[in-house]
Structure formats: structure tokens, C-alpha cells
Image: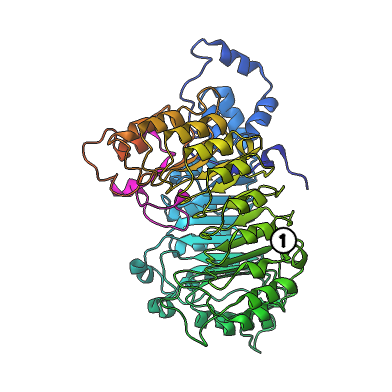
Amino acid sequence: MEDTVAEKKPRTAGDGDGDGCNGEPSGTAESSGGGGGGLVERLPEALLVEVLGRLDLDDACSAAASCRSLHAAANAALSAVTAIDLSAFAPSNAILGRILAGNGAVRILTVNCSLLDDSAASVIARGSLRELSLLKCSFSMSFFVAVGAGCRNLRSLKLEMAVAPDILYSRYSGFGTCLAPIYTGCVYLETLWVKFPLLDPRTAEYETGTGLPLIPSNIKDLLLQPVSHSRAKTVFLKTTSLNKHITDSLESLSLVLDTITDELVMLITSNVHKLVELCLEDEPVTQPNLPEDLTNVGLQALGLCHNLRHLSLTRRCCDFRRVSDAGYAALLHSGKDLKKFEVSNGSCLSDLACLDLEKAAPNISEVRLLNCALLTSDTAKSLAPCTNLRVLDLSGCKSIADSGLVSISKLPNLTLLDLAGADITDAGLSALGNGRCLISSLCLRGCRRIGSNGIASLLCGTGTINKTLISLDIGNVPRISCRAVTVIARNCEQISSLCLRNCLLITDSSLEVLGSMGCDSSKCSLRMLDLAYCSKLSRNFLRHFEPPQFRGLRWLGVGKNVAQRRGCSPTVAEVLERKPGLTICCNACDMGCRNKSHPDIRFLQ
């Protein structure tokens, strides 16, 4: 079925600086005698609904506050929206109720639940939902009972719990108990993600405390974070008492473990025959010893998964030192249909494993090789013939130099490039700026040999990157100055995410330039800005974030201790009061607090 006009674009929203889309208009042009209101009044309501239906949710809410005609049209448009994304800011119960009021068509809903309580279930639980993602939530049993009873047609449930370990066990006798009403009521559920970012898979209490919930047999997409490898094995062991097991339908599996082992990998490959996507991540305390480790034997077993399209192996703190080039090459050459390949901390992975990759995996579109110290620019040259490549992440590969960037610049379909920590210079950025890549996301964090001149060469070249770039990370680069910020503001008006973390030459003048972006148009595109540890910012730098500056900003990272400063004007609390749609992070999180769950700063004032 074709989408309606209101379905054409998933909504990203904040409540802006106004009262929300279902609040009363703050002022009307009709009543003030202005001609604009009369013109809007004369436009057909269907046309207004059509126009507002094409806007982002926050823009529609802003328009709704301007006059009664647009207020009514916004209500009509929003009542037909089928995909709503409220992850960029944390709505209160009241704001969430106003956004969803009268909407019986929403099928996909994502909510940042930091400010919500159990009573929000009366708004969230609705029969039209097919996909529900609840981020940073700490709901109790009653909430899950309401969702199970109200979302009978739910196909996908993604939970990111923001409950601290010290209160988790007092709240739940077992998290599986909370999910039981979901399993009972949502009989069509196919996707289940359960994430406890604050818990450690190595924590013994997790083994005996929450345990693993019983997984329904009809689940096709499963993510569990965290879980020990010993407990994970119980998920894939079939029992004769069950006619149907989860392994019969499972196609996508993601596990965050204490240790990835050959035993677990072989158990998965021998029992899950429809596996298309496998993501395994671990964080062992010390370098694992045999047999509690992943070796070439485990990788050869993965080669038997003939349906495998996406593979990700991530190890934090330690490395995969028992997997050699032979293991990686055997896997790559056995998976002709492989589209995504990711390895993190592969200390024995070298350029040899990537030779002839375009022949071994001709459909490869995403390659992520993180912190692989043996990789050089030769790997980038080997990837140049992979014309389908859209994502290339070589962060932490410190031997990637300008010659590799020249090869990368020739990839016609590349949209995401991460070269954090690479040994590139301004000359390499010039080659990228004159290339034909359609890059929308670029990370140059920690590339210490580049500077403001390189950013100018990147964005003022003959290529198209200055028109396609949406996200740029130039944090931890000591030579980035206000000049680079000015170049970005003048040449990349569409940029929505900018990281300047630990750029020690950034001053308040940079904020003046960024804050004025979009002043000549109706919309400011900048949504996220990271200024953590920019030590040259003045004590009162937050004054640059007062209205009307940074109108579209939804997330601001300012590093630690800013919230506790005394004598600052304005304070963090005052900025948040004037911009309720803004999130200010004082925890030094990466952009958007990815994979971090901590209390909203409003609770800490």
C-alpha cells in the first residue's frame, strides 16, 4: 500500500520553544490585524494540511502556535502521521499526550522516555502500533501489562532500560516477568531488543538476578545486552519438549557478551540455519585464554552460514589475537553474498586479508575495520574497486595516510567515512574535497596533522561533499580554530551534527557564527553540537544559546562540571527553561549520548 502524504517522511521532533502542537496558539495574526492571518484563512484547509504534513514534527508544532488556521491544520496533519520519532528530546507525559492526541494511525513510534512514568502507557499503548522503541526507560510491571493489552498488533519492540543496577533487582523479581505480558498479548511479535546499558555482562548478580527472559519461538530479530556466553548458550539449545524453537525462525542475532568463544559461535551456526545477520560484542576483563576465546576455528564455522549477509565481531579493551589473516580471508571468500563486514580490535588483521575483496564479496556495501593496527593505506587501495561500498569505517587504523584517502575519494557511492586517528594531512582532505564521494557523515576525530586549512580545502573544493555533508566530527584536533568553524557555517548550511570536542582554539566567536546559521532562512539545520572540553570558551558561553540563536538545536554537549559552575549567566537550568526542547549533556558523552543512559540534567538542578 502506498504511503499517504503524512507518511512520506519519518518525523523527528522536539517540542521547540513553544507550547506543543496541541496547545493553544500563542498569538494569532487574525486577531492582531495583520494581513498574513487573513491570507492563511483564505487558503483551502486541505492545502494547509498537505503542507504541514510534509514538515518535521517540530516545525509543524511551531507553525501550529502562529495562528488558529495553522493550529487546526497541524492537528489534522499530525493525526494522520504514521511514523513519529521522539528520540532527539525527552517529552513529558503532557507533551507526549498532546503530540499523540487524536492520532489513530501511528504505526512506528520511538520515544525518549527519560521524563515519562508508568501513566504514559495510556498514551503509548494503542492498537495501531506495529513498531515501538522505548529509549532510556525505567517503567514498572504495570506499564508492560498495559502495552501487552493495548498493542495486540505489535511486530517490533525495542527496549533500552535506564535502570541503575542497585535498584534493578528491588524493582523486578526477574525482568522476564515484566516481558511475560508482552509475549502473551503481542502474539505477532517478531523483533525483540532488550538492552541494559548500565549493566556489565560480567556481573555475577545479573546471572542470578534478572536472568534471561524466555524468548518466544516466533522471534526473527533478537538483541540481548548484556548476557554471559554461558547463559547465551541456553537460548540456542533445543529441547525435545518444544515443537517449535526460536532457532527455527531466527534471522538476526545481536549479543553483547562477556566473552565470544568458538563454542558459542559453533552452537549458533549449527542450530540457526536461517541466520542472515550476526553481531557479537564482548568486553573481557583480561585477554581470554583457550578454550574461552575466538579462533580461526570459530570463523571457519561462520563460513558455513550460507545465508549470512551481515557479520560484526567487536571486542573492547582486549583484541582478537587468536584470529589470523587466514581465518578472516577464509570467511570473506566463503561468503559471496556478504554485504556488511565489521571487526573491531583485530590485532592480527592485515592488508593481506582484504586483497581482492571485490571478487570475494562483490556485493559488499559496508566495511568497518576498527583499531586494526596492521592495516595501512594498501587496504584503502584494495577497497577502491568496491563500487557498491557505502560505509567505510577505519577508525583507529593509524597507518592510513593520504594515499589511502586518494583511493577512497574515488568511491562513487560512499556516504559514511570514519578515519578517526588516521595519519592524514591537509593534502589528503584536498583530494577528498575534489573527489566524487557523496559523503553525508565524516569523522576526522584525532587526526592531529590536519588543521583549518584542510577543512577549507575539504569544503571549498570542486567536489560535492560541501553539499552532501550532514554530520562532521573534528574533535581532538589541536589545529582546528574559529576559521574552520566559519568555513563550515558558510559552506555547509545543511549540516545537522558537529563535534568540536577538545578543540582548544575554539572561542565564543565560533558560537556566534554557528548560532547565526539559518537566520537568513526559515530553518536552522544544526541539531547536535559537542563542545566538551573546549577550554577557551568563556565562563558565560551559554548566553549564545539563548533564543533566538541555535533555533533548531536539540542536543548540546558541554562536558563535566559546567552544571556546577557558580556565577554563570545564564545557568544550564535557565537555558533549559527557555528551550524545553533542548538536551544539555554534562556527562562528556559522545554525540547524542549514544549508548549512555543517565538521568536527565533537569533532575539534577
Residue 351, above or below 84: below
| Image spot of residue 210 (x, y percent) | 44, 75
Name the main secondary structure of what is drawn in magenta. Answer: loop
Residue 19 showing in the rendered view = no
Residue at mark 1: 364
Q: Magenta segment: does it hold 61?
A: no
Q: Residue at x 38, y 68 (%)?
A: 168
Q: How many marks?
A: 1
Taking depth in this image into account, of 129 and 368 the one nearest to the observer is: 368
Q: Quadrant of residue 349 in the image?
A: bottom right
Looking at the rendering, the stretch of residues picked out in magenta corresponds to 578-605
- Locate the C terminus by quadrant: top left
Q: Is residue 559 visible?
A: yes
Residue type at mark 1 is Ile
Query: In the figure, is residue 343 to the left or right of 410?
Result: left
Establish if 76 lies above or below 587: above
State the image coordinates of residue 564 (x, y, percent, origin top left).
Answer: 25, 46
Q: Position of residue 108 (x, y in %)?
A: 62, 51
Q: Would residue 581 be counted in the magenta stretch? A: yes
Residue 204 lies in quadrant: bottom left
> Label 1 neighbourhood size at 10 Å, few (<14), some (14-19), many (20+)?
many
**Label 1 SS:** loop
Of residues 600 and 585, the one drawn nearer to the viewer in this rendering: 585
